[in-house]
Every structure is written in structure tokens, then in C-alpha cells.
Image (spheres, rainbow, N blue to C red):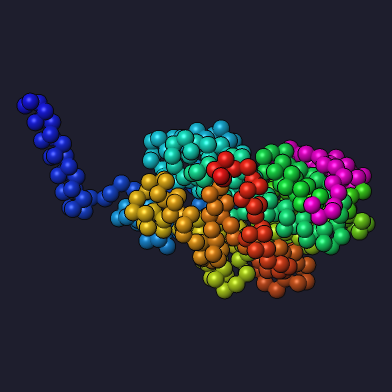
Amino acid sequence: MKIRQKAVHLVAAAALAAIAGTASGQTAEPLRIGVMTDLSGQFSHESGTGAVEAVRMAVEDAGGKVLNRPIEVLVNDHLNKPDVAAAKAREWFDTQNVRMINDLINSGVALSVMTVAKEKDRIAIVNGSGSSRITGDACTPNSIHYAYDTYALAHGTGNEIIRLGGDTWFFLTADYAFGHALEADTTAAVKANGGKVIGSVRYPIATADHSSFLLQAQGSGAKVVAIAGSGTGFINAVKSANEFGLTKTGKQTLAGLLVWLTDVDAMGLDIAQGLTLTNGFYWDRDDETRKWSKRFFERTKRMPTMSDAGNYSSTMHYLNAVKAAGTDDTAKVMAKMRETPVNDMFAKNGKIRIDGRMVHDMYVYQVKKPSESKYPWDYYKYVATIPGDKAFRPLDKGGCPLVK
């Protein structure tokens, strides 16, 4: 009995000490969020340090604290290796008490980290990656796909090009999860609009020589040669197609199924001009996007991509949800994020569905000719707006097991 009483007294004393410590101004345990991105590889120019700065901007704009807890940002270069990313995510969750991981560029990386987040009951927000599997058969109750996906890219760009007469297609597809999903979703869009896919070839994502693949594309006779890839691999493919003279005869059109603003900057308008693209965010869209983007530019010396803007918006949405829920509990925060519309410089009346898809308007643009650009980073001309309910795959068509 004395031992039990002593134990009760010790617990009470510890509780009183904790209360006293809080009252005396000792710092509460930080709320830690992670940015897992490509800092050194082929996707670093559209994400990388830009993703990190976007998340840090959100933390600063939130006041650096939530629920009287300081917010800490951890950063990791996943090296485009899903196993490396999964191991780091597990370490962060287990030893650093990280509550949310953002960016996750590279679809293989995103899918692996989502699995760990579900296992550890933490949150994964995907902005850099596009595979529609993320809200399809691979969906989880702990993950959100925020900025864009391959379904939206395929239907936006595919529908516009077919409308202009490009009804036969050949795919140059990057050989990894994102490229495969983008080809599959675009193929479905082409066929649904009465078009025909003549053939496809897959290239290693790290290749710098696309000549053999371009020969096959040229020999196919397809009106549209579509590049289903991203990063420096995509940039190299467009440059190679330009040097190869693929479009000089006027018989074939080059389509970029994912074109980042930083891709256009790297290639230059003389090479990128005329590309039709679908995007979730453009810095020069309106006064609100311009105001935020200029702040981002001051920190990074480049204008933001849709992934950068999505990283900021989703981090802010997460922190606001933690505050509203009064806790960092995963289920309660996810519920608050789903029930609260997104209204900021990234999206208006955005809504997170049960499958994790954040539904918002998407935009079709065309890359300007050099003569049409009036100032730095003036790269796109507006073509059309795709309402969110039309831009993204219907909820009951993705195969997400959470959808009843």
C-alpha cells in the first residue's frame, strides 16, 4: 500500500511540475513538419529549394506557432529513391515525432511515403507528384493529393490538342510511375474524344539521348508526339526534338503533358514556344497570385511552380486545421481539412474529397512566342479554365477503397 501511495504521489508531483513548467514559460514540444523533396536530382529545378521555401513561408505567415507550440521544418533530399524516402519518413515519424510530410515529388517516392504515413498514422500531402494512383487504388485516409494529377493534365491538354485536330498520338513515356500513369490517363482521354494512339516507347528517366526514341515517333506518322515525363528528362526530350527537326515539316506537333514554368525558363521561349499545357497555378494569373509570387521570388530568385504554390497553400491549410481542431491528432486534423474549403492565392473553393483529391480549377495555357513576352517570366497565354468538377476524375471512377 505504501508503495502504491508513493507511486501516486510521484505521478501527481510530475503532473504539477509539468503544469508549473508550462506556466513558467518553458517551450512546449514543437510541431514538426517535414519537406521531402529532390534537392540534387532531375526534379530539383521545379521543386527542391522552392518547395522548402514555400513551406517555410507558410510557417512564417502562420506566426511560427500553433496551439502555443513552435513549428519546426525538417528537410530531406530523397534522392529519387522510394526506399530511401520510406526509411527517412519512418525515422522522422518514430524519432522526431513529425506529424506531416509535404511536397513528395516523384510519384514512386510519394506512394512509398504514403504507405508509411498510413502505418504510423501521420499525414502525407503530395504536391510535386502527379500519378492518379495516389487517389485511386493507392489512396489512404492519411494522404492528400493537392496541386494536380495525371488525369487533369491528360484531359486538359489532350482535349485541347484534339480540338485543334491532333487526333493521332505517339507517346514518349518516362519509365516510372508518373510517366506510366500520365500515358494511361492521356490514352483514355484521346480515345474518349475519338482520337487514336498509334504507339509508344518508354525511355529511362535519366537518359540524355532521345534520338532513337524520336526516330520511332517520327516514323509512326502520328500527328501528335506526346512526352509523358518531367524534370530534366522532359527538357532534354524537347530540346532533342527541336534539334531533330521533328516539327519542322508541320506534320507533327510536340505535346508536353507536364510542363513546369521552370522547364520553359530552362529551355527558353524559342524552343518551348507553342507548347500547350495544363496547370494548377500561374504566377501572373491575377493580382493575388502576383503578390504572393513576388514574395516567393525575393527568396528564391525564380517565380513559383504550381508545386511551390501548392506546398505553401497546403501547409497553411494544415496549420489552420491543427489550430481549428485544437490538436495535432491525425484523424481530427484530416477531418477539419476536408470540411474546410481552400480559399487563397492557389485555389478558390477548393475541396478535399474522401479519396484525398483536392478539387480545384485547372487552367490550359500555351507557351508564348519570344515576341509575345513583355517582361521576365511572362511565358504563358491563357486558353481556358477547367472547373474543378470537370478537371479531376469523378470520385466513383478511381477505385479508391475509401469510396463507398
Residue pictured at 13% horizontal, 40% vertical? 13
Picture quadrant where residue 365 is located: bottom right
* Residue at 70%, 73% in the rendered image: 374
Image coordinates for residue 216, horizontal then vertical, percent: 88, 42
From the viewer's perspective, is 58 left or right of 264?
Answer: left
Q: Is residue 236 above or below residue 273?
A: above
Residue drawn at the location 68% of the way across and 54% of the way down: 152
Instruction: Describe residue 349's horizontal placement relative to residue 93 as left or right.
Output: right
What segment is highlighted magenta in the picture?
A: 192-220
Residue 265: percent from left, percent from top: 69, 59
Q: Nearer the viewer, residue 315 or 167?
A: 167
Q: Quadrant of residue 82?
A: top right
Give residue 197's position: percent from left, percent from top.
Answer: 84, 46
> Quarter holding the C terminus?
top right
Task: Examine the structure image and report whether residue 353 is included in the region drawn in magenta.
Answer: no
In the rendered image, is residue 227 in sight?
no
For residue 104, which quarter of the picture?
A: top right
Question: Quick one: which residue is furthest to the left in this view?
Answer: 2
